[in-house]
Image: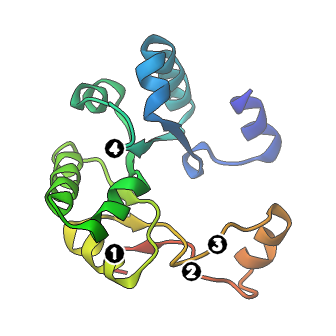
């Protein structure tokens, strides 16, 4: 189905990033592996979504060859509570970087969180700090630059 949609819309596959939650990989590892292989053969990028929300292992990062890791907002929200949250976040980012996997932090709501995540080495930040959810019919106008909020902040940009 994905190949048909790409063909019908004339969308280059490298412009599309599909996100799969870690729960899917844990529950259906063989099916997930086969799906990722097919999607990657089409030229799509695959992101591991909600990393840290469940029980994904380091082995999944190696096994599935993700193009991006998206850190779950629960890890970001924990930064405000102290404890060892910062160390956990730093270790998670370092792990991804050691495997050459870019990192997106989800659920960024404050300038302080954004600054910390930037210092930790996150490549992209997403969250209410940049934009609330947007209705599909508003996307075209936003992409054309009319009343466009910042969708994502790329570290160093």
Q: Quadrant of residue 56?
A: top left
Q: Earlier in the sequence, mark 1 or mark 4?
A: 4
**Viewer-side label of 3, 2:** 3
Residue 27 located left or right of residue 5: left
Disc 4 and disc 3: Cα gap in Å? 23 Å
In the rendered view of the protein, which quadrant contains the N terminus? top right
Q: Earlier in the sequence, mark 1 or mark 2?
A: 1
Instruction: Classify mark 3: residues with Cα within 10 Å, few (<14), some (14-19) or many (20+).
Output: few
| Closer to us: 48 or 2 | 48
Residue 52: image tag: 4
Q: Quadrant of residue 63?
A: top left
Circle 2 residue: 150
Q: Which element type, helix, strand or loop, lies under badge 3?
A: loop
Residue 87 located left or right of residue 75: left
Q: Earlier in the sequence, mark 2 or mark 4?
A: 4
Residue 132: image tag: 3
Disc 2 and disc 4: Cα gap in Å? 25 Å
Contact flag, marks 4 and 3 (Cβ < 8 Å) = no
Q: Residue furthest right?
A: 137
């Amino acid at each position: 189905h994905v190949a048909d949609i790409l063909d019908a819309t004339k969308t280059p596959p490298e412009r599309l990033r599909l996100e799969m939650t870690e729960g899917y990989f844990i529950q259906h590892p063989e099916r997930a592996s086969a799906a990722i292989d097919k999607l990657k053969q089409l030229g799509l990028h695959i992101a591991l979504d909600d990393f840290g929300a469940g029980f994904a292992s380091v082995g999944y990062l190696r096994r599935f060859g993700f193009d991006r890791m998206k850190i779950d907002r629960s890890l970001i929200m924990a930064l405000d509570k102290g404890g060892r949250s910062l160390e956990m976040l730093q270790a998670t980012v370092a792990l991804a970087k050691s495997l050459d996997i870019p990192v997106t932090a989800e659920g960024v709501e404050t300038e302080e969180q954004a600054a910390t995540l930037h210092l930790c080495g996150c490549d992209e930040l997403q969250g209410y700090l940049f934009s609330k959810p947007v209705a599909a019919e508003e996307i075209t106008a936003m992409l054309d630059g009319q009343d466009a909020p910042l969708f994502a902040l790329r570290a160093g940009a």
